[in-house]
Amino acid sequence: MTRRHPLRYLTTILMLCALLPVPLPASASETPARRSRASWYSDELHGKKTASGEAYDMNALTAAHKTLPLGTVVRVTNLSNGRSVLVTVNDRGPYRGNRDIDVSYSAAKQLGIVKPGSAAVRIEVLGDAKGRPLDPDSAYFVRIRSYAGKAEAERLVRKLEREGEAAARVRQRTENGRKRWMVCVGPFRDFDDARALRRHLMQRHADIDIVADRARD
């Protein structure tokens, strides 16, 4: 009997859910980006309850914000190096200093602010309180890795297929002004679905993140 990889079933279910049309509220609109200051959660808070009720996971892509609705998806960009990360707001704060947002340890690593502790950032709201993209032509993708060359990306896809991740594919996109080939799984219309797949893939692959991109090639 052929053994089927359990992750393949998870990916298939999530991808089918992503294909279902989800109408956005008529009032949903892009919130202007604003300059802010970001810091990151202390490791000591790992496992502690957040305002949303879920436990803080230092390896997840989450953040605390004073006013944005819980569940809102934002892109945080470090203005000093151009690096960005997508996070979902699941907690309140920060309440000290001049900071506007606290990001998880994993998000801080992607932004490059673990050592300095804080940085000037730009915050853009991309998803509503249910985690759905405000832009109807946009979707979320779990990015496993990006390459300068297409051949390298295709090699990783073949490796992932051997591991049972048949949904992985290559997409061309522009990152920091340069053309890159992204190995990813998606599209997803629900940020929580993308988070769930990222959590499973992190068991075998490091530094996986979630990006927003056009829904169709």
Image (cartoon, rainbow, N blue to C red):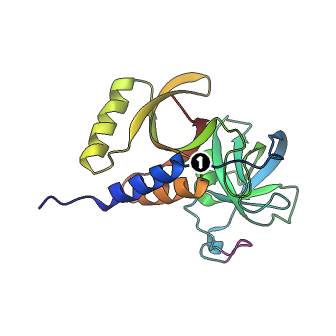
Which residue was labeled with disc 1? Answer: 189
SS class of the residue under badge 1?
loop
Residue drawn at (54%, 27%) of the image: 173
- Whether 82 is drawn above or below 177: the answer is below
- Whether 165 is drawn above or below 199: the answer is above
Identity, as a three-letter code, of the amino acid under mark 1: Arg
Residue drawn at (60%, 72%) of the image: 46
Could you say which quadrant of the image residue 123 lies in? Answer: top right
Could you say which quadrant of the image residue 212 lies in? Answer: top right
| Residue placed most toward the observer, 179 or 197 | 197
What number of labels is visible? 1
| Residue placed most toward the observer, 130 or 19 | 19
Numbered range of the magenta stretch: 49-53
| Residue placed most toward the observer, 10 or 119 | 10
> Where residue 163 sits: x, y (%)?
27, 50
Magenta-highlighted stretch: main secondary structure? loop
